Amino acid sequence: MKKSLFIIVLMLAALTQVASASVKLVASSSDLASIAKEIGGDKIEISSIGTGKANLHFVEMLPSYMLKVSKADIYLKIGLTMDQWADGIIDGSRNGKIVIVDCSKGIDVLEKPTGKVDASMGDVHPSGNPHYWLDPRNGKTIAKNILDGLVKADPANASAYEANFASFTQRLDSAWQNWSTEAASFRGLKLVSYHTTYSYFANAFGIEIAGQIEPKPGIEPTASHTSELINLMSGQHISVIFREPYFSERAPNSLAKATGATVYTVPSSVGGVAEATDYFSLFDTLLGTLKKANGH
Amino acid sequence: MFELLQQPFVQIGILVSLVLAGIHAYLGFHVVSRGVIFVDLSLAQAAAFGYVIAIFAGVGDHSMQSYFISLAFTMVAALLVAVSRTKDDRIPQEAFIGIIYAGFAALAVLVLSHHAEGMETIQEISNGSILTCTIPELLTIAGLYSGVGIVHYIFRDKFFMISENRKQAAASGMNVVLWDFLFYATFGLVVTSSVHIAGVLLVFSLLVIPPVIALLITPSKGKRLAIGWTVAVVGALAGIHSSLVFDLPTGPAIMIALIILLLLTAGVRMVTRKTSTS
């Protein structure tokens, strides 16, 4: 009895040791959290504000977010004006010692508007397309940004982080080889997506996003836009529609009805669908869907 | 819970909600006795549309410029509301107020339909976010609302006369359209700032629910205001408390707390009426 009590006390002591030794990290998205887990391993405690099931462009503020960030050592931002809500959380948490990492640093940004951006240009992300994590080659850049942040926040464990970074990039390289081979079979496949979410993904795997359903989520597509899309899909024999889990099914389904195409619900982030549990299985899921779509 | 109360964002959130409760519960009495319940929704929507225009013009949605653009649209709506009070009793003023609301809401969607961050902005303006309020924002609204409060205190007889008995006010030689516009202009000043911090829906709840509860409880004019303020403060604090304990969005939590207070009041009233008649 005494012995077991002693062991429990020891275990509790060990637990508090672990809890106080760990670096607390908060990420805007599940993708950044997944890569951070690869780099930080058991040295860091991770929480993610994005779940993968919700649209990252807009986040409803909860007290727990502010609380987490107020106690965190490091915050991972998506950047490129994707998660401007994060600034509100970071400012509001008034955490003076937090290390803020903009994970888009060093990314080769697609769809960057040239010259002055004004509203007449339509649905343009002012800093370029922010869905950069969907090109697995960008995973390395993200990992490097996270590594630098972790080393800054917790220099004592720098060597462990560096070793994890090396192993992660190695595994990502070999996965990239496999994915590229897999993607060769549907190179040039054309599809229609909902939003400009998959530009980086298409760029990485040689597929073509021929059009977008709704330039604006939540606003019905105009009649002329819809008929253009139907003509485009019929003319180019496009039979694949990608829908992110957080967008309504109405518009994709009616377009599918009109053109005979099939709607596939695909993740845009880790956790978007059940199979996409981490950064690697996110691409496995996306490529698996394309393989299925290509067979049709 | 105590640990949470030490967080600056919680402290500021509580102060912001108290400042909002103070002015809105008072203005709500005017709104309710005028029978123009949806006026704040239409002015708030006009304010929201102003922010939309500011974003469209590229001046950012949290700058002084955007506030004044927003205020300008609120004033246009205030003017429309003031002149829409017709002598023709067959058309209730509420109809025009509803049209103003729907018009600005539709315009906002049209303008933002081709803008990258449009929908997020519309959502943000409906829901607000008290917890991310900054100290300068808190000081700004505290100062502004005190100013509006002082103006209302000085001209209280005129404002209450025109709200409660328009015919008598017109008979006494007051310029009713001018005073109406003045009322809506001060109201617009408040709503424009509140919408940006608390969102359209919470502003509406703070305006309408406390006066309704007070009117259910007491016929006396003097007590009404005290009860309205008490209700607004209790609702705001209870809402923030449950938002922290159950990790819920703060604005909607305050709204539901106010509605629960209303249901309790109505329930108690029904029981006491039954016992007094039997």
Image (tube, rainbow, N blue to C red):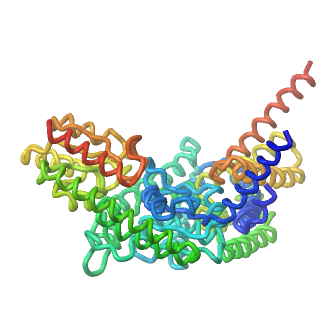
* Residue at the outermost front position: A3
Judging depth in this view, the residue of B5 and B138 nearest the camera is B5
Q: Is residue B267 above or below residue A41?
A: above
* Residue at the outermost top position: B278
Q: Residue A48: x and y, percent?
A: 52, 57
Q: Residue B65: x and y, percent?
A: 51, 79
Q: Is residue B171 visible?
A: no
* Residue at the outermost left position: A235
Judging depth in this view, the residue of A178 and A210 nearest the camera is A178
- Name the residue at 55% across, 54% down: A60
Q: Is residue A286 above or below residue A64?
A: above
Relative to A15, is B224 on the left or the right? right
Disc tally is: 0
Q: Residue B215: x and y, percent?
A: 80, 44
Q: Is residue A143 above or below residue A48?
A: below
Q: Residue A252: x and y, percent?
A: 27, 41
Relative to B200, is B114 on the left or the right? left
Q: Which image quarter is the C terminus of chain A in?
A: top left
Relative to A288, is B49 on the left or the right? right
Judging depth in this view, the residue of A80 and A194 nearest the camera is A80
Q: Which image quarter is the N terminus of chain A in?
A: top right
Judging depth in this view, the residue of B81 and B267 nearest the camera is B267
Q: Is residue A253 visible?
A: yes
Q: Is residue B164 above or below residue B187?
A: above
**Quarter of the rendering containing residue A245:** top left
- Name the residue at 29% across, 70% down: A120
